[in-house]
Image (tube, rainbow, N blue to C red):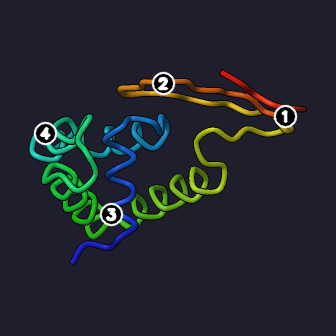
Amino acid sequence: MIEPILIAIANSLAGKATGALYDLVRTKFAASRHDTAALEAAAGADEGDQQISRLAEALDRAETDDAEFKSRLRTQWAQISISGPGRSGDGAVANDISGTVSGNAVQARDIQGDIRF
């Protein structure tokens, strides 16, 4: 059974939202057309799609075969999980809105008072 963390990593990679992590995996998978295809097929896939499962399986094989890769992958993931998307240092905020959006949206850090649309 694939570890839940690998499913989470695969979902994140599908959105290519994690530049350094994506680059690490892409470099590792470069020697394998099968694994590269799994990474590419997962691009833009929804959570739970079969492409995500295939990518998680490829990550599991890569970790099993290469302890250094496993360590680097888990370290990168921990850094992303701690800082998370939309968080920056020194009190800064980075917001992203993607996908199909309808209606009103506000991206802000500190709001004093009301917001009305």
Q: Could you say which is closer to the camera, residue 64 or residue 51?
A: 51
User: If the image is split into quadrants, where does the C terminus sit?
Assistant: top right
Please state the horizontal and vertical placement of residue 57, each as a whole percent of the image: 19, 62
Please state the horizontal and vertical placement of residue 106, each as a whole percent of the image: 65, 26
- Residue 1 found in image quarter: bottom left
**Which-is-in-front pick, marks 2 and 4?**
2
Sequence-first tag of 2 and 4: 4
**Which-is-in-front pick, marks 2 and 1?**
2
The three-letter code of the residue at mark 4 reads: Ala
Cα distance in 3D space between marks 2 and 4: 36 Å
Cα distance in 3D space between marks 4 and 3: 19 Å
The reply to whether the C-beta atoms of the residues labelled 1 and 3 are less than 8 Å apart is no
Cα distance in 3D space between marks 2 and 1: 22 Å
Callout 3 crowding tier (Cα within 10 Å): few <14, some 14–19, many ≥20: few
Say what secondary structure mark 1 lies in.
loop
Residue at the spot x=44%, y=27% of the render? 98
Identify the residue under disc 2: 103
Is 18 left or right of 81, judged from the image as shown? left
Cα distance in 3D space between marks 2 and 3: 47 Å
| Mark number displayed over residue 110 | 1
Residue at the spot x=15%, y=55% of the render? 54
Callout 4 crowding tier (Cα within 10 Å): few <14, some 14–19, many ≥20: some
Identify the residue under disc 3: 66
Q: Could you say which is closer to the camera, residue 44 or residue 9?
A: 44
Sequence-first tag of 2 and 3: 3
| Mark number displayed over residue 37 | 4
**Which-is-in-front pick, marks 1 and 4?**
1
Sequence-first tag of 1 and 3: 3
Callout 2 crowding tier (Cα within 10 Å): few <14, some 14–19, many ≥20: few
Please state the horizontal and vertical placement of residue 67, each as a whole percent of the image: 39, 67
Residue at the spot x=22%, y=64% of the render? 61
The three-letter code of the residue at mark 1 reads: Asp
